[in-house]
């Protein structure tokens, strides 16, 4: 693996680490407020956090990067719908089910690469099989399928579209791209006001959403754009499956959740798949 590709993989691994820390936080937030409020408020805080850079960029360059703005908006539509469906579905299912089903976006990305782009390789197929098996073992989703699982699955297709769009438009400024990616989700304030269910806006919930916005959205998505400049969409999707690995490890370290043997084996399978995809694809 050359230095440039290594930097891309490292950026995507760090992205997965930040995303992995979001699942327990989302579960707490969505138990207190509607999926509409959660979606637009998280995105609004994210946009506010990036606005100073936008002002600096305009003063320095005088104009925006068209590619970054266009790609960010397109990816942002997929992101907004995915975020909303994930939050809505997580209300009716377990965190482990949500993590597993969200991770299935890797399958949709690989289907796109294989059927549309026609650039699939046996190494990618092997890494896909290993990663999905590992994902199942580490998340240990419950049996049965309910409406929450269906909503998260629909959201998973949107996450796959987001990965593909980032791969296509990742050459522009990554922070400007991320800012425009956050914009579409702020529109969820409209149905929230119509339904009449904004809030509650307690300080503890705002603090949690601010973490999700600035760290799990702004920082993570900027790193994603940088990483996907050097790594293909199919490989990136495999790397993103390290997200539940980090989520499980953090839960073990921070809140003393146990890690059973199956989860450890699943984590090893995902890391093996990530290495195969990163080096051999």
Image: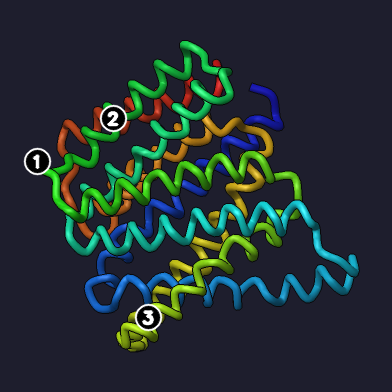
> Which residue is denoted by mark 2 in the rendering?
134
| CA gap, disc 1 and disc 2 | 17 Å
Q: Position of residue 162 (x, y in %)?
A: 52, 47
Instruction: Count every numbered label the image shows and give the total.
Output: 3
Q: Position of residue 235 (x, y in %)?
A: 52, 29
Tell me whether the residue at label 3 lies in contact with that at label 2, contact meaning CB atoms closer than 8 angstroms: no
Q: Residues within 10 Å of mark 1 (few under 14, many from 20)?
A: few
Question: Element at badge 3?
Answer: helix
In the image, residue 25 sits, relative to residue 177, either above or below, namely below
Question: Element at badge 2?
Answer: helix
Q: Residue furthest front?
A: 194
> Which residue is denoted by mark 1 in the rendering?
143
Residue at image position (69%, 45%) is: 169
Residue at image position (53%, 43%) is: 163
Left or right relative to 23: residue 125: right
| CA gap, disc 3 and disc 1 | 33 Å
Left or right relative to 248: residue 210: right
The numbered mark, 3 or 2, whose residue comes first in the sequence reads 2
Answer with the quarter of the image where residue 53 lies: bottom right
Q: Position of residue 147 (x, y in %)?
A: 18, 54
Question: Element at badge 1?
Answer: loop
**Mark toward the viewer: 3 or 1:** 3
Q: Which label sits on residue 61?
A: none
**Mark toward the viewer: 3 or 2:** 3
**Mark toward the viewer: 1 or 2:** 1
| CA gap, disc 3 and disc 2 | 38 Å
From the image, which quarter does the N terminus lie in?
top right
Q: Which label sits on residue 192?
A: 3
Q: Residues within 10 Å of mark 3 (few under 14, many from 20)?
A: some
Residue at image position (59%, 60%) is: 181
Left or right relative to 257: residue 161: right
Which residue is at the front of the view, 233 or 5? 233
């Amino acid at each position: 693996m050359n230095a440039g590709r290594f930097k891309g993989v490292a950026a995507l691994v760090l992205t997965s680490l930040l995303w992995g820390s979001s699942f327990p936080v989302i579960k707490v937030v969505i138990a207190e407020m509607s999926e509409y409020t959660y979606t637009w408020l998280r995105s609004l805080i994210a946009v506010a956090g990036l606005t100073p850079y936008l002002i600096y960029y305009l003063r320095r360059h005088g104009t925006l990067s068209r590619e970054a703005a266009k790609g960010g908006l397109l990816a942002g539509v997929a992101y907004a719908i995915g975020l909303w469906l994930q939050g809505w579905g997580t209300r009716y299912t377990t965190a482990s089910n949500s993590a597993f089903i969200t991770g299935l976006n890797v399958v949709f990305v690989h289907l796109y690469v294989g059927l549309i782009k026609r650039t699939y390789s046996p190494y990618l197929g092997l890494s896909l099989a290993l990663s999905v098996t590992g994902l199942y073992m580490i998340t240990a989703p419950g049996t049965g399928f309910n409406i929450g699982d269906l909503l998260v699955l629909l959201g998973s297709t949107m996450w796959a579209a987001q990965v593909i769009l980032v791969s296509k438009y990742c050459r522009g400024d990554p922070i400007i791209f991320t800012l425009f990616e956050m914009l579409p989700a702020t529109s969820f304030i409209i149905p929230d006001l119509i339904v009449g269910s904004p809030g509650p806006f307690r300080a503890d919930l705002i603090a949690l959403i601010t973490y999700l916005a600035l760290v799990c959205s702004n920082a993570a998505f900027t790193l994603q754009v940088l990483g996907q400049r050097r790594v293909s969409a199919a490989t990136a999707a495999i790397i993103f499956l390290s997200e539940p690995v980090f989520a499980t490890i953090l839960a073990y370290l921070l809140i003393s959740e146990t890690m059973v043997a199956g989860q450890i084996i699943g984590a090893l399978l995902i890391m093996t798949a990530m290495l195969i995809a990163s080096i051999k694809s």
